Image (cartoon, rainbow, N blue to C red):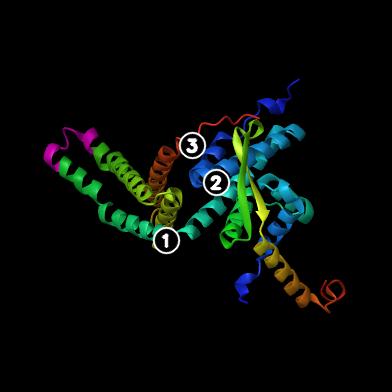
Amino acid sequence: MTSQADFVQPPRIATWLVNLFASPEEAESILGDLLEEFCQLASRSEVAVARCWYWRQTAKTITHLAGSGFRAAPWLTSAVVVGGFLLYGFVSGLPDKVLAAITDRYLTDWSAHFKTYMFVASDGMLIAHIMLSMFIGCLVALTAKGKEMVATMTLSLILCAMAGIVFVASIAQLWPTEDGLWWMLAQLAGPFAILVGGAIVRSRRSISTTGMESLC
Amino acid sequence: MSGRDYLGEFEHIIVLALLRLEDRAYGVTVRQEIELRTNREVSIGAVYATLDRLETKGYVKSHRGDPTPERGGRSKRFFQVTARGVAAVNRTQRALQSMTEGLDLIRSYS
């Protein structure tokens, strides 16, 4: 007779996250161990408890993997992060300039194309900024071979911290809170897109080593 | 002898767990052995990070077992303490014993 645990699967997103941060050799051992203990726990107690345990282990494991990944190649990772930061600084104003040039060239009579003009000036700018950030994330990840997520996560955290400092400073200058929050969210979209870019490159690289059966 | 020859607290615990488990030492058993004996929740990531560090120092060595179905077709990584590892444990134990000698820890400092 098969028990409930025979059909239980560990959380897929958690497994994917471990795959992102671990090297293929590390992922083989760590995911195997996590699955083995998850199945033991699921057969002994409730599945929800086992899933909760799996998520807790994943969160702690990712922290250790990120730390040990940085310590394993501190200079390479730092150099890639600094390079990514400088590139971000140089090109972050590019979408605004390109879109401004487009609107100047093609939307001279803005009152006739009011909706298009408004889209380009607001959402278009944000989308272009996100696309560019994702591209920078991909470049950083491609350079930091084997340390894709550590490098993109470090760069994202630095940019988030800078946005946070500016946000706090802006509150001190009594900015309208609603605009300030919207500005903060728009600023966080860039670092998040960098992280997504890193995850895309990492997933593409580890695609050949994944696809194992993960059922209890 | 330099300070680097001593094991850190978690390294010490891990090597002792490997010595207790003998040829059954891999991620799951090491993690469970530590939890059982220290009542402290340990993450598998912390165990592997420390084991990798110990392997780099030459205190442990590892080999891969066969893939098993209960692990989703993944293999186990077994660990073994080397002679250098045993010497490092002895050195650390002696240093700790020397430091605690003559101290009545339970009565004086609890």
Q: Is residue A165 above or below residue A42?
A: below
Give the crowd class for mark 3: few <14, some 14-19, many >=20 residues within 10 Å.
some
Foreground pick, B54 / B31: B54
Q: Is residue B35 visible?
A: no
- Which residue position holds label 1? A165
Q: Residue at x 67, y 62 (%)?
A: B83
Q: Label 3 lies in what chain?
A: A
Q: Nearer the viewer, mark 1 or mark 3?
A: 3
How far across and how far down the image is residue A203, in percent?
44, 39
> Is B87 left or right of A142, judged from the image as shown?
right
> Is A206 left or right of B83, judged from the image as shown?
left
- Callouts 1 and 2 on one subunit: yes
Magenta stretch in the rendered image: A104-117
Foreground pick, A10 / B6: B6
Q: Tag 1: residue type?
A: Ile
Give the SS element for disc 3.
Answer: loop
Q: Residue at x 34, y 57 (%)?
A: A85
Q: Label 1 lies in what chain?
A: A
How far across and how far down the image is residue A191, in percent?
39, 49
Residue farthest to the front?
B83
- Quadrant of the image occupied by residue A197: top left
Q: Earlier in the sequence, mark 3 or mark 2?
A: 2
- Which residue position holds label 3? A209
- Which residue position holds label 2? A26
Foreground pick, A200 / A164: A200
Q: Earlier in the sequence, mark 1 or mark 3?
A: 1
Q: Tag 3: residue type?
A: Thr
Q: Label 2 lies in what chain?
A: A
